[in-house]
Every structure is written in structure tokens, then in C-alpha cells.
Image (cartoon, rainbow, N blue to C red):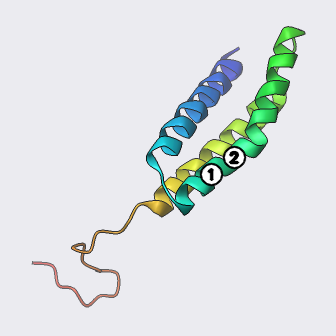
């Protein structure tokens, strides 16, 4: 029971993240954010059919965490690096 509730939470988190990130993105990032919809729209339709016949929407539970992880990765990669941030990984910057 707890597993199913957690998976529904992931499905809701994916849906909210997809909607919010699609509204806030632009350009090539918007295209990258919309790519999961190609797979998730048919999966959601299949899940609705499964729920109508009292089945568990297993495919939705499998694909939602993957799609959410993809959205988080694309959102992280699209955030610009601030120019004022020093590069301290090369060892040349000194800490005071």
C-alpha cells in the first residue's frame, strides 16, 4: 500500500514539474522539456484505461520516475552559471 502511494506521489510530482518547467522554459530548452510528453501522454491514456478496469497502472509507475529524473536533469543543465562565481576547482584561487 505504501509503495503505491509513493508512486502516485511521483506521478503528481512529475505532472507538476512538467507543467511548471514547460511554462518557464524557452527556446531549445522548451523542446527538451516537451520531449517526455511524447511518451507520457499515451502512458497517461493507458493508465486511465487501466484504472477504469480496476487494474494498477504499472506502466505509469515505471515511466514517471524516469521522466521526472529527465526533467530535473534538463532543468539543472539549462540553468546558466553565474559569471561572478569563481572557478576554484583548478586550484588557482586562494581562500582568505
> Is the residue under label 2 in contact with that under label 1 (CB below 8 Å)?
yes
**Residue 28 location in percent, x, y?**
56, 62
Q: How many marks?
A: 2
Quadrant containing the C terminus is: bottom left
Q: Is residue 35 left or right of residue 62?
A: left
In the depicted structure, whether residue 89 falls above or below residue 67: below
What residue do we see at 82% from left, 13% from top?
51
| First of labels 1, 2 by sequence position | 2
> Gap in Å between the C-alphas at discs 1 and 2?
8 Å
The 10 Å Cα crowd at callout 2, few under 14, some 14 to 19, many 20 or more, is: some
Front-lying residue, 32 or 56: 32
Quadrant containing the N terminus is: top right
What residue do we see at 54% from left, 49% from top?
72
Badge 2 marks a residue whose secondary structure is helix
**Residue 83 location in percent, x, y?**
26, 74
Badge 1 marks a residue whose secondary structure is helix
**Residue 40 location in percent, x, y?**
74, 38
Q: Is residue 95 left or right of residue 72?
A: left
- Which residue is under mark 2? 36
Q: Is residue 66 left or right of residue 18?
A: right
What residue do we see at 67% from left, 40% from top?
65
**Residue 14 location in percent, x, y?**
60, 35
In the depicted structure, whether residue 78 falls above or below residue 11: below
- Which residue is under mark 1? 70
Residue reaching furthest bottom?
A: 92
Residue 31's image quarter?
Answer: bottom right
Q: Is residue 82 left or right of residue 22?
A: left
What residue do we see at 80% from left, 18% from top?
48
In the depicted structure, whether residue 4 falls above or below residue 80: above
Amino acid at each position: 500500500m505504501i509503495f503505491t502511494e509513493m508512486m502516485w506521489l511521483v506521478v503528481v510530482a512529475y505532472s507538476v514539474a512538467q507543467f511548471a518547467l514547460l511554462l518557464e522554459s524557452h527556446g531549445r530548452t522548451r523542446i527538451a522539456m516537451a520531449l517526455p510528453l511524447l511518451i507520457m501522454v499515451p502512458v497517461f491514456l493507458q493508465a486511465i484505461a487501466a484504472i477504469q478496469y480496476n487494474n494498477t497502472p504499472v506502466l505509469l509507475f515505471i515511466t514517471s520516475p524516469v521522466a521526472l529524473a529527465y526533467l530535473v536533469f534538463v532543468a539543472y543543465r539549462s540553468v546558466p552559471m553565474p559569471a561572478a562565481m569563481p572557478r576554484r576547482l583548478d586550484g588557482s584561487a586562494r581562500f582568505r
